Amino acid sequence: MTEYVVRFLVGGIVVSAFSMLGDILRPKSFAGLFGAAPSVALATLGIAIYMHGAEYAARQTLAMSAGTVALAAYGGTVCHLLMRARLRVAITTIIAVVVWLVVSFGLLAAGGLT
């Protein structure tokens, strides 16, 4: 039960802080950007350090970084296939998911995390 309370409090505080930061910055589209991924990642890492130690959190950071690169590859693939190749959305999604999986698991395997 204590873990859930800690997750709730840390997550809420970090998400609120990033949302306020995004609300201060211009353009306002940063509010959604700052309110999502960075705040959740920092809250998760804080909890990981508290519950499992710094070494575990370091592995989680590497996994998050691999996911970030894979998501960028996914987005680039989607843009290329939809805008330039003019493929259908369903086919583009299937191809892009395969690209995301290959990049993410390839990076994780290269980093020795699997």
Image: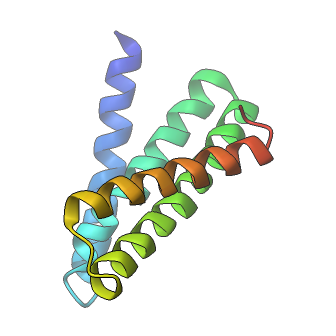
Residue 51 in percent (x, y) is at 58, 22
What residue is rendered at 35% in x and 76% in y?
Answer: 81
Between 107 and 12, the one lying in front of the other is 107
Q: Is residue 90 left or right of residue 40?
A: left
Residue 57 in percent (x, y) is at 65, 37
Q: Quadrant of residue 48?
A: top right
What residue is rendered at 34% in x and 53% in y?
Answer: 94
What residue is rendered at 32% in x and 22% in y?
Answer: 5
Q: Quadrant of residue 103?
A: bottom right
Between 75 and 45, the one lying in front of the other is 75
- Which quadrant is the C terminus positioned in? top right
- Which quadrant is the N terminus positioned in? top left
Between 5 and 77, the one lying in front of the other is 77
Between 29 and 53, the one lying in front of the other is 29
Does residue 76 sit above or below 112 in this rendering? Answer: below
Q: Is residue 89 left or right of residue 47?
A: left
Residue 17 in percent (x, y) is at 32, 60
Q: Is residue 80 left or right of residue 114?
A: left
Q: How many marks?
A: 0
Q: Is residue 63 left or right of residue 87?
A: right
Residue 56 in percent (x, y) is at 69, 31
